[in-house]
Image (cartoon, helix red, strand yellow):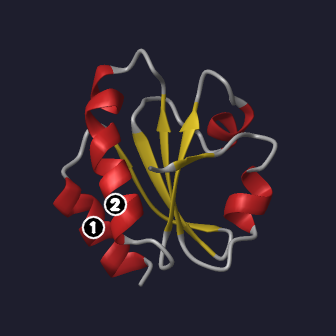
């Protein structure tokens, strides 16, 4: 299962992480977000120890999505060393998420 991250622990969990981080910005009412949930959880298990896979509920934490200009969900942002490496918006396949991680972060 992907770990939840909030505005309050974003800096510690993401910006100060010693491994790359993929964040899924989502909301419970978002159909495509719910559809991607199991894929995000699978990736969390597959990349354990290599890439941190986190989820942020945009309804509960709005400062961080605002800071990164998130206007639509689901949005995935890949971070490494506190910097944004890549971003995708909308429901995407597991293979395209893996490709993003492999090409940009590992």
> Where is residue 37, by image quadrant?
top left
Q: Residue at x 25, y 32 (%)?
A: 35
Q: Confirm or deny contact between disc 2 and disc 1 (CB under 8 A).
A: yes
Which tag is nearer the camera, tag 2 or tag 1?
2
The x, y position of residue 88, in whole percent, is 36, 50
Instruction: Tell me which numbered mark, 2 or 1, is placed earlier along the sequence.
Output: 2
71 lies above or below 102: above
In the shown orientation, is residue 58 left or right of residue 95? Answer: right
The x, y position of residue 66, in whole percent, is 66, 34
Q: Residues within 10 Å of mark 1 (few under 14, many from 20)?
A: some
- As rendered, which of 86 and 21 lies closer to the eye? 21
Cα separation between marks 2 and 1: 8 Å
Residue on which the image places disc 2: 43
Q: Residue at x 18, y 62 (%)?
A: 95
In the shown orientation, is residue 92 left or right of residue 65? Answer: left
Q: Secondary structure at mark 2?
A: helix
The C terminus lies in quadrant: bottom left
Instruction: Give the residue at the far top of this rendering.
Output: 29
Can you tell which mark lies on residue 13? none
78 lies above or below 90: below
Exactly how many numbered labels are in the figure? 2
Can you tell which mark lies on residue 98? 1
Q: Residue at x 38, y 63 (%)?
A: 45
Q: Secondary structure at mark 1?
A: helix
> Where is residue 97, by image quadrant?
bottom left
Q: Residue at x 78, y 61 (%)?
A: 12
Q: Residues within 10 Å of mark 2 (few under 14, many from 20)?
A: some
């Amino acid at each position: 299962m992907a770990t939840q991250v909030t505005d309050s622990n974003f800096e510690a969990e993401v910006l100060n992480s010693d491994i790359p981080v993929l964040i899924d910005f989502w909301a419970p009412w978002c159909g495509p977000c719910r559809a991607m949930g199991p894929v995000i959880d699978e990736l969390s298990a597959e990349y354990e120890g290599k890439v941190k896979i986190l989820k942020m509920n945009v309804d509960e934490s709005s400062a961080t999505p605002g800071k990164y200009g998130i206007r639509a969900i689901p949005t995935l942002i890949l971070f490494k060393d506190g910097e944004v490496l890549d971003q995708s918006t909308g429901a995407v396949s597991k293979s395209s998420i893996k490709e993003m991680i492999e090409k940009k972060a590992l």
